[in-house]
Image (tube, grey):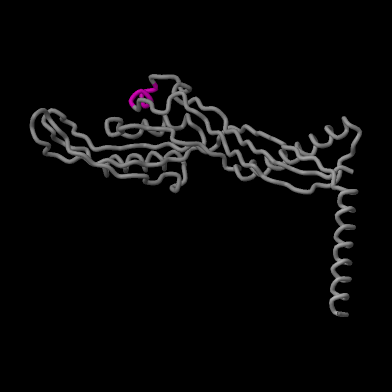
Amino acid sequence: MKRFVFSALLLAASAAAFAQTTTAVEKDPIKKIEVTGTAELEVVPDELYFTISLKEYFKDEKNQKDKVALETLEKQLIEAVKSAGLPKENLSVSGVTGYREWTGKKKPQHFLAGKQFQLKLSNANNINDLMSKVDDRGVEYVNMSRVEHSKKEEFRRQVKVNALKAAKEKAGYLLESIGEKLGEVLEIHEVEEGNVYPMYKQAQYNVRMMAADAAPESEGLEYQKIKYSYRMNATFRIK
């Protein structure tokens, strides 16, 4: 009987403590404000990546004689990169292709090889001078495949910081408009929107025209800036 009474008293005390805690929370809830801050940054790319495709060909296409080997074309490209003062690592192999040459109704008798390279440049206009040193008949195409910036990580960090500052500023002036004051931050959530890369007006252009400077330098080389955009969700206490 005594044990039962003791247990009942303990249960009653726990219930009373829980009721007091609940009442205290209801009387003094945490006042907070949730906001979203955004920030953007546009920069001009300083790393331009070109895809260059070389292919073997016949000097006498009609009779399929005197084939210009892929090794010869590759050597020309490597020498062109070297003479331009570019680091060796700026040029790398990105793919290898091959096909048989068909002539009319005859079965293909000759195999022509091809190879694709990736070339990193800091200036798009440099591609004209560089490709003029490579046999244009052996160049299948040249594409500006992508762009980057050497300080992209630094820019990303800065944009995220700016987005968080924007969230705090927004919370501050919203509370000020209703006579409240901003307290400390309670939660921060990163919402990454990523990067917006340029859309090229002309991604592929004629190599023979480039080598002969038949078109203005700006033609086929125009691109937009890279945009870094981020959002930060933040929750602040209201004093």
Q: Is residue 16 left or right of residue 169?
A: right
Q: Position of residue 187 (x, y in %)?
A: 75, 48
Where 119 sits versus 13, above or below?
above
Magenta-drawn stretch, dominant element (helix, strand or loop): helix
Q: Position of residue 198 (x, y in %)?
A: 52, 30
Q: Is residue 160 left or right of residue 2?
A: left
- Say which of 70 and 3 sits in front: 3
Q: Quadrant of residue 111?
A: top left
Q: Position of residue 130 (x, y in %)?
A: 40, 34
Rendered image quadrant of residue 59 = top left
Residue placed farthest to the front in the image? 1
* Residue 162 image point, x, y percent: 72, 39
Residues drawn in magenta:
208-213
The answer to if 162 sits in the magenta stretch is no
- Looking at the image, which residue is at 41% across and 19% down? 215
In this view, the residue in front, 75 or 98, is 98
Is residue 209 part of the magenta span, yes or no? Answer: yes
Q: Is residue 195 above or below residue 29?
A: above
Name of the residue lying farthest toward the bottom: 2
The quarter of the rendered structure image containing the C terminus is: top right
Q: Which residue, as the protein is rendered here, is positioned at the far top?
A: 215
Residue at 85 percent of width and 54 percent of height: 22
Front in this rendered view, residue 9 or 150: 9
Q: Nearer the viewer, residue 202 or 195?
A: 195
Residue visible at 51% across and 27% down?
223
- The number of discs equals 0
User: Which quarter of the rendered picture does the N terminus lie within?
Assistant: bottom right
